[in-house]
């Protein structure tokens, strides 16, 4: 086994399979946090759009939306353009939950970075950016990207970073 296989095994075992306490705490609502984040990012969505984004059944999304509605964090309304369609949007309480969840994540990550130190944090961010770029062009079951596709992806990533 080469270093690549060992690294994948370590990632699966140590990172992807063992979610952090922060991740578990934020996902305590079994999808509620995801829905709040999606609606905060996308705005008004239909239940089927949310179900597709979560990769869950219509029954599961209905249960999540009912729980959020009971907590006063979302409202469902009839689409004025298509009375057969339902639209879901955040209430002020839902937007506040989204802000609070994101601030809690940010605070936790900042603490982690403070433990890692500036040099290792910057190295980590650079490596995560590079890894993410490779992940964005390497599709399972498809041929691996050509050197030209890799070059273009990194050029785009570089331009996107400059525009932030």
Image: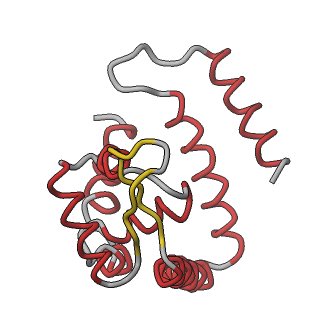
Seen at 31% across and 46% down, the residue is 48
Relative height, residue 136 to residue 120 (above, below):
above
The residue lying toward the viewer, choosing from 140 and 85, is: 85
Seen at 18% across and 48% down, the residue is 57
The residue lying toward the viewer, choosing from 60 and 85, is: 85
Say if residue 8 shows up in the picture. Answer: no
To which quarter of the image does residue 73 belong? Answer: bottom left
Q: How is the image coloured?
A: secondary structure
Q: Quadrant of the N terminus?
A: top left
Seen at 32% across and 52% down, the residue is 47
- How many discs appear? 0
Q: With 22 as the anchor, is 117 left or right in this view?
A: right
Q: Quadrant of the C terminus?
A: bottom right
Q: With 19 as the anchor, is 35 left or right in this view?
A: right
Farthest residue, direction right: 162
The residue lying toward the viewer, choosing from 51 and 7, is: 51
Q: Position of residue 163 (x, y in %)?
A: 84, 48
Say if residue 16 shows up in the picture. Answer: yes
Relative height, residue 10 to residue 76 (above, below):
above
Q: With 28 as the anchor, is 2 left or right in this view?
A: right
Farthest residue, direction left: 59
Q: With 105 as the anchor, is 24 left or right in this view?
A: left
Seen at 24% across and 76% down, the residue is 67
Q: Position of residue 160 (x, y in %)?
A: 77, 43
Q: Position of residue 32 (x, y in %)?
A: 32, 70
Relative height, residue 85 to residue 97 (above, below):
above
To which quarter of the image does residue 40 belong? Answer: bottom right
Q: Position of residue 35 (x, y in %)?
A: 38, 63
The residue lying toward the viewer, choosing from 1 and 88, is: 88
């Amino acid at each position: 086994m080469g270093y690549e296989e060992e690294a994948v095994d370590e990632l699966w075992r140590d990172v992807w399979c063992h979610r952090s306490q922060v991740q578990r705490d934020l996902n305590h609502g079994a999808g509620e946090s995801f829905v709040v984040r999606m609606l905060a990012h996308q705005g008004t969505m239909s239940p089927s759009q949310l179900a597709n984004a979560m990769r869950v059944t219509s029954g599961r999304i209905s249960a999540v939306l009912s729980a959020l509605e009971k907590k006063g964090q979302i409202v469902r309304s009839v689409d004025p353009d298509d009375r057969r369609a339902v639209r879901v949007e955040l209430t002020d309480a839902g937007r506040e939950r989204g802000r609070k969840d994101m601030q809690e994540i940010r605070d936790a990550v900042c603490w982690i970075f403070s433990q890692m130190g500036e040099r290792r944090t910057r190295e980590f961010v650079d490596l995560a950016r590079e890894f993410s770029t490779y992940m964005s062009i390497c599709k399972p079951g498809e041929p691996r990207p050509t050197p030209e596709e890799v070059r273009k992806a990194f050029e785009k990533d570089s331009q996107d970073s400059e525009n932030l």
